[in-house]
Image: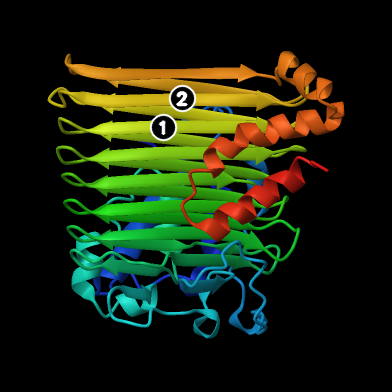
Amino acid sequence: MNMIIKDDYLDKLIASWKKEISPVHSVSYLDQLKADALNCVESLRLPTIRDEEWRFTDISSLRATPFPRASAATLPVSDNQADTFLDEAVCKLVFIDGRYVPGLSVQTADNSITVSSLSGLTGTSSVAEQYLGRLADFQENVFVALNTALMHEGVCVIVPADVAVKVPVHILYISSRKEVTVYPRCLVVAESGASVTVIEEYVALHEGVSLTNSVTEMYLKDSARVNHIRVQRESPQAFHIANSSALVAKSAQYDSISLALGAHISRFDQKITLAGENAGCEVDGLALIAGRQLADTHTFIDHANPHCRSRQLHKCIMDDSAHGVFSGKIMVRPHAQLTDARQLNRNLLLSDRARVDTKPQLEIFADDVKCAHGATVGQLDRESLFYLQSRGLTETVARNLLTYAFGGEVISRVTVPSLRQHLEQYILARTRIS
């Protein structure tokens, strides 16, 4: 017998967002999608440590935060960009507390790509019906269901066939108020032969408790290329839950870098489907946490066709009582012969109280493949420390220099110069190199 257990937190959250919920009997695709997701929310519950996929990440404290959405009247009117990490000319879309702010946004000077807010997408029903909500499955994921049911604003990026976008598309999410919940939504469609860099940056102007629940869907058509960079540096008291899905078609290439630098508890679920022959992906990640921060990364790379290639490197640097979690799964389907997949998780513990739980996984149902995976957990190498000290560095500087070098391997793969430079400076400051 299938019993539905009511979740008081979800009931309170839905009640606080009551005015934002679309009519159930609306005829538009978007409103019907939101209504269907809301029905799923009512039959789901928040995950607990008794659930296998969440057994290392306790989000029970989230139940004290059924926050409403920020009122439009309270949104800042200044041009404070929260010290963004990008200096280049970009196509920028700015969201403050979940609301799109046209006055702070910068659109492209030509018509080479289409960038619009979610409200602008509603007039293009064919785009919404064809792509929105197709990859991000909300049937069993309560956070995706909540995002889909309660999303108000978002961004849609459409790159036409054979167009190479020269400037990055920068999506800046600013949290300016504590005790609010935001549901960012991002849809990217790269048509055949297209190329684009998309940067999602999450920042905060406060140090209070808030909740960000974001969902990103990316479609890469044949021979398309997408470089996707996520930088999460929200309040040290915040909750950050994110889900990202990418569908990679024949001969397309998806490159991803995810950086978890902020939030009290952060969780990033990433699913990549290599859906066409010769598709590929390179997935890199870095979590730099301290205090009592927890950063959880779950990835699933699905080799659904032959001749596909994937590379994954995820690193965690944990100090004080921080807790890092990595669970990465690579699946090779029965007909996905000649798969080439490698996965590596490396973890650096800077204190005796820091903790990491790592679970790299391979599921292979084909016999002609090259697959490898592994994980390492350790502290700074004593011989390297001794060598640097013998060259005149103090022990503190030597430790911090080695820590920076450990994370620098991921940062060096950021292709946007100003972003890479700011990230390097940020890590130098966090590791206190003098």
x, y percentage for residue 29? 24, 69
Above or below for 376 versus 33: above
Left or right: 345 with respect to 109?
Answer: right
Residue at x-position 35% and y-position 68%:
156
Q: Which mark is residue 354?
A: none
Residue at the spot of label 1 = 312
Left or right: 370 with respect to 270?
Answer: left
Circle 1 SS class: strand
Quadrant of the frame with the C terminus: top right
Give the alpha-carbon distance from disc 2 to disc 1, as whole Å: 6 Å
Circle 2 SS class: strand
Above or below for 399 versus 96: above
Q: Which mark is residue 344?
A: 2
Residue at x-position 19% and y-position 47%:
249
Quadrant of the frame with the N terminus: top left
x, y percentage for residue 184? 48, 62
Residue at x-position 15% and y-position 44%:
250
Q: Earlier in the sequence, mark 2 or mark 1?
A: 1
Residue type beneath disc 2: Leu
x, y percentage for residue 96? 58, 72
Residue type beneath disc 1: Gln
